[in-house]
Amino acid sequence: MIEAIPPGMILILGALILPFLGGALQRVWLVLLPVLGFVQLTLLPEGLAQSFEFFGYGLNPVRVDSLSLVFAYVFYLAAFLSVVYALHLRDTVQWVSGLVYAGSAIGALFAGDLISLFVYWEITALASLFQIWARRTEAAYRAGLRYLVIQVSSGVLLLAGTILHFADTGSLEFGALGLVSVGTTLIFLAFGIKAAFPLLHGWLEDAYPEATVTGAVFLSAFTTKLAIYALARGFAGTEILVPIGAVMAAFATFYALIENDLRRLLAYSLISQLGFMVVGIGVGSEMALNGTAAHAFASVLYKGLLFMAMGAVLYRTGTTRSSELGGLYGSMPWTALLCLVGSASIAALPLFSGFISKSMILTAAAENHYSLTYTVLLAASAGAVLHSGIRISYDTFFGPDRGIRCDEAPRNMRFAMGGAALLCFALGVAPNLLYELLPYPVNYQPYTFSHVADQLQLIAFSVAAAVLLVRLGLYPKARSARNLDIDWLYRSLLPGLVQFAGRQLARLKSAIESRALMGLQSAVRYVQGHHAPTGVLGDPWSIGATALWAALLLVAYLLMAYL
Amino acid sequence: MSQEKPSVSGGQADGAAMRRGLRLLGLICAVLFVADFFVEKHGHHAWENLPGAYGFFGLLACGVLALVASLLRKFVERDEDYYD
């Protein structure tokens, strides 16, 4: 019976009941929903498919296979941890939108056709918007509008691509598509926007840091990883994804290294991690796709953990500017410790989750002879030690004391962070927990002497490099600044161009007006010259002259009639 | 391990603890480098099989990253309230 409810629908429908509950019951219901959803997921038989006819089109809103399931498991875990993290709120809007957002993202994972995918795709866009707007500031409102425009554009591209693809092939099935036609290219771009491809990524670093404390945690989990899933489903082995992913991993690392707002730093760090997954999809071998799914799974958890820790810092201190933070360990020891677990995971320290997932993608890239990409990804891994390890964890909690004294994070936040940290550690020590969920059989052993030795060296020497660079004055220090990125095009250049064009048009208008006025005036003068009472034509004629002219005209007419 | 990392913000947290941390970091790096001579390697590229290759790569990569990031900063950095 439980199979009759489409996955994700438990969260969406359950969320709609939430406003009508009160007090403790509301909170219990909130936490219970992701648990119920998770249980439903474990009961779903693989291979299950629900389909129906809609205006003569065969739709397939539920299709269960291992690729969908591995993403769905981690989405439910993320939904659970996120609602626990948000339990201290007195804000039903954020709870409802968070659950609908998570539920629609999970629904999208099981969409067997492109129309169902489109519907869920747009619900995630709308629902997630409230995680930004709920901050209730002018900046968040504006960032939310920009976010909405771009997210909806992604949906429009998806729909347009679907229509063209259907016209070409007569099929709405969401399976392997490949870059074979205009239609599938549009779909590729739609996925690319949400996966934060280079130049299409502006919305992410623009909007996520403007979200609420708890909203950023929700946002970090679903939208981008849904896009990764969709790319893995539709475009596995599309070679252009390899350079795209490598560029993502690299440029986002540079931006992360100079970013002062720690939640924006995490947004860049997120793009860098997505780069790894995009490379995996582009390589397209079984190990690469396993690596992509595994890394998505691991990164939802550790990235969520890091966003939670920085959210707790924002909640307690009112800022996430690195230049104003330091020495918070004394005030927030639990947050500090749990944040370190997140940093260790993203830095791929052995015994933590990143170690067992990132290396699958790296190995697959090397095995398929993408040597340059391999080197870029390895450098991005070293960069992650600097920005997501040292700047996020060390500088904030253990660096020089900036005199901020505050309370430890609320209990529910600590509980959520603890859960995420526990999962990061569990995956690190027992990788088979995750490997068994992956879409293909795993033939990979992360704990070899060689791999552990290499990775420990990479991390230790990266830390040593940071020390040396600081001593030499070459390390980019945290300082109050705003770094321009691609969103500058539509936040500054485009409005500037519109204003410029407006001014030029106004000038043109006044020039035309004054010219026209002058022309009109001279025309009036000319006409006046002839027709005014003093002009030649204004002069009244005598009756005799008029009669003579009339007679001459009649004669001429007569002559012409005879000719 | 991460708790002993030195400050990257440039200030001094606690002199003695900092010195201990740095010594520990130096020791860890040295041990890892020496141990690397005894680890059987099966890297995909020839350079990966050299002892200490990953350590050297880490140093080099972080140096390049920091320099390029600083260069990028010259072009993109504006006042914090640039968009306001």
Image (cartoon, coloured by chain):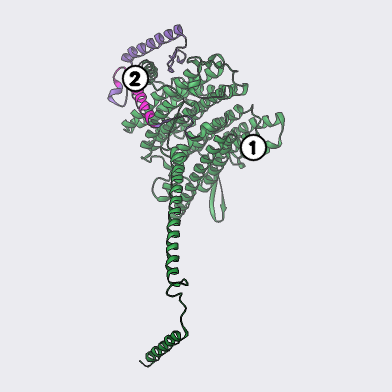
Chain colours: A green, B purple
Q: CA distance from mark 1 to mark 2?
A: 50 Å
| Residue name at image x 36 percent, y 22 percent | B62
Amino acid carrying mark 2 in the image: Leu
Q: Report in which chain the residue with disc 1 lies.
A: A
| Residue name at image x 43 percent, y 14 percent | B6
Amino acid carrying mark 1 in the image: Ala
Residue A92: give x, y in percent of width and height: 65, 34
Residue A335: give x, y in percent of width and height: 55, 19
Q: Nearer the viewer, mark 1 or mark 2?
A: 2
Q: Residue furthest top?
A: B16
Q: Is residue A552 above or below residue A518?
A: below
Q: Which range of residues does the magenta coloring cover? A: B49-75
| Number of numbered callouts drawn | 2
Left or right: A491 in relation to B32: right
| Residue name at image x 55 percent, y 33 percent | A211
Q: Which residue is mark 1?
A: A15
Q: Residue furthest left?
A: B46
Left or right: B19 in relation to A407: left
SS for tag 1?
A: helix
Q: Which residue is mark 2?
A: B59
The disc label shown at residue A458, or none: none
Question: Magenta part mainly helix, strand or loop?
Answer: helix
- Front-most of residues A376 and A309: A309
Q: Is residue B23 above or below residue A247?
A: above
Q: Is residue A436 visible?
A: no
The image quadrant of residue A29 is: top right
Q: Is residue B54 above or below residue A22?
A: above
